[in-house]
Amino acid sequence: MSSDTRDVILEARNLAKRFPVGMKLFGERQSVRAVDGVSLKVHRGETLAVVGESGCGKSTLARLLLRLIDPSEGEVFYGGRNIAALPRAEMRRLRKDLQFVFQDPFSSLNPRMSVGAIIEEPMRVHGLGNAAWRREEVARLLTRVGLRAEFADRYPHEFSGGQRQRIGIARALASGPKVLIGDEPVSALDVSIQAQVINLLEDLKQEYDLTLVLIAHDLAVIRHMSDRVAVMYLGEIVEEGATAALYAAPLHPYTRALMQAIPIPSPRARKAAVKLTGDVPSPLAPPSGCRFHTRCPLADLRCAVDRPALQDVEPGRRVACHHWQRVAKEGTAALAEPEASQAARRRLSLYRDRSERQQNSVPQSES
Amino acid sequence: MQSDTATLPAAASRTPLLAVEDLALRFGGSASNVVDGVSFDVAAGETLCIVGESGCGKSVTSLALMGLLPMPPAEIVRGRALFEGRDLLALSRREIGKLRGDRMAMIFQEPMTSLNPVYTVGDQIAEIVRRHRPVGRTEARARALEMLERVKVPAAKRRLDDYPHQMSGGMRQRVMIAMALANDPRLLIADEPTTALDVTIQAQILDLMRELQQETGTALILITHDLGVVAEIADKVAVMYAGRIVETGPVGAIFDDPQHPYTLGLISSVPSLGERGGRLATIPGMVPTVDRMPAGCRFAPRCPFADAACRTEVPPLAEVAAGHAAACRYAPLERHFGDAA
């Protein structure tokens, strides 16, 4: 059993979601097992990242955790209650605590509503304050996410991607949530805007005492933002652990492969690492045994038939692999990012100092 | 810092296959040039990465070179692009159409939009071959098979008759590469070729491109926003901001001796994979739009080092070391702003 005794705020137990696809003329209806038996604890105040490649089920998991969609099986506990079984009306009340930030700020904001109305809506729905109070609150939230209060009267199409994501964040904060789930909240943004939004999310997390669940595929962003990581492959969690430990020594061959595939922004890091071959198999017909065995360099006969359980291997560390000890022993051609040259370090720190000084003196906003 | 870059091939010594000189483009009616005086070159076997964020003009530049930019609304304000002795920008639509897919080719970010959904991938590769070569159907099909094998599509013979939608994103990108290379082009332009792909697939595609380039000696221009990809594959780098090249040099110089504040800002904006650091140093504000381009240095409004002079005078792209140039009047920065060490 896990030795983790910290306060659990959100917990998934054996969560599964199947989506029916098409219809066979004869025989049973086919379904994609997008999430297949996921158990996961989110601790109060932490940032937990769920990482995986397209089709691994991470976005579906995020939606299940907040019950934006109903699970096929399993339970989600929040505040001691199974929200997967809660009547709609009660669930709606709970939404105040559980908010979502979407990847695509373009499609998640109603184009016909003014920015002010968009941000005010959650407060109105949950009956917070009166109109005057809410108007002030909208202005405060806008300023807090780095936008101008006057923007309340404008419409989403008038804003850039980064600004829209800030609007999405302001809306998510409006009801005073306890848990914020972000589904790739920065991945559609340009590098420089992405950095701004990452900083903003981190500041807000402290300020509002939030618990963050971050769905992402960018391992550098995850390294920077999260305390713990869960790695998903084809609907299952294959490894979970504290971020620093997991990055220093991945125990699942898939985690290791993911790490080795990241292009490192240093020309001296060019590597001839072992790369994964092949594509992710279709979740319509996941492989037998360990789902990763078709791409795994360590796979043997056992892996093809015997599905490895997600087991506790160290306090706070779980892995689902028959050969995790071998992975541990082999070590990783670690993610050692070679240190920048002296000239680069000097200029980067010059840039950092200078821009921090400037941003502190001028109230910075993206406008 | 010199020794770090000395190990890289001396790009300057090679004759360029493509030399773009002072290219300026604008869209009809807009107040300023969307690409404003851009020069770069690339030699056979060499990889030039053009790095920048959305709206910096990197894609517009490559489309113009390929003759794929609709004119009007776009127009060439000035400049030329010499490719094998001919100015690409002066060619007629027919002439450049003959070059494209033959002597030069392009790969896009989303292969699904550039592949025709109603033809098999084999037919599409064969069609490209037959458009430029006097070969029969059988021969073209044989070439298509050969190309699919070269880009390592498993069970190539069978996949020849697949339609694009039957393939994964990674396989479709391989097909795109096979099509682009089918006629042994001398120049290949790849616009964010791995951006839509998962990281393990991206690694495969980058490996493949590198390997094929070594085999064929094709010159490669790779357009990307990802500094990791740049570090992985580039020989030379051009950093673009708001339609201008702000820094260019051998890949080692860009990472080990970055000069332009925008380059520094970009590098700082990427979270590190190492120890968890504090806040990211960011670039404040956002990219200017084409109808509100600042005078002087276009980066000045976001630059922590900028002063009044930066806001009025356009800084020239000046050499700071052999083959390494930056468009900043205060490069190297430490000489003007003391040391922060």
Image (tube, coloured by chain):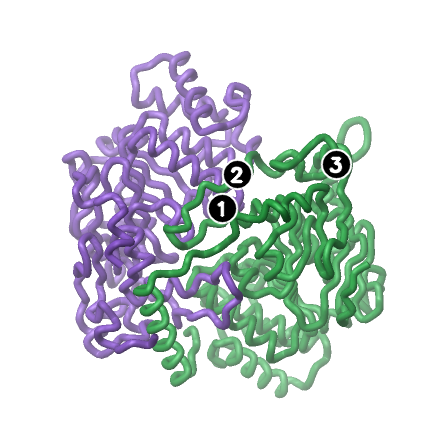
Chain colours: A green, B purple
Taking the image as shown, residue B60 lies to the left or right of residue B144, namely left
Instruction: For the residues labelled 3 and 2, say whether their Cβ atoms are less than 8 Å apart.
Output: no
Q: Is residue A226 above or below residue B216?
A: below
Q: Residue furthest front?
A: A329
On the same chain: label 3 and label 2? Answer: no
Q: Name the residue tied to disc 1.
A: B196
Near mark 1 (Cα within 10 A), the count class, few <14, some 14-19 or many ≥20, is some
Q: Residue at x 43, y 38 (%)?
A: B207
Amino acid of disc 2: Gly
Q: Which residue is mark 3?
A: A289
Contact between labelled residues 3 and 1, with CB atoms less than 8 Å apart: no
Label 3 chain ID: A
Q: Residue furthest left?
A: B85
Give the CA separation, mark 3 to mark 2: 26 Å
Left or right of B227? Residue A234 is right
Q: Is residue A198 above or below residue B90?
A: below
Image coords of residue B78 (percent x, y)? 16, 51
User: Which residue is tagged 2?
Assistant: B169
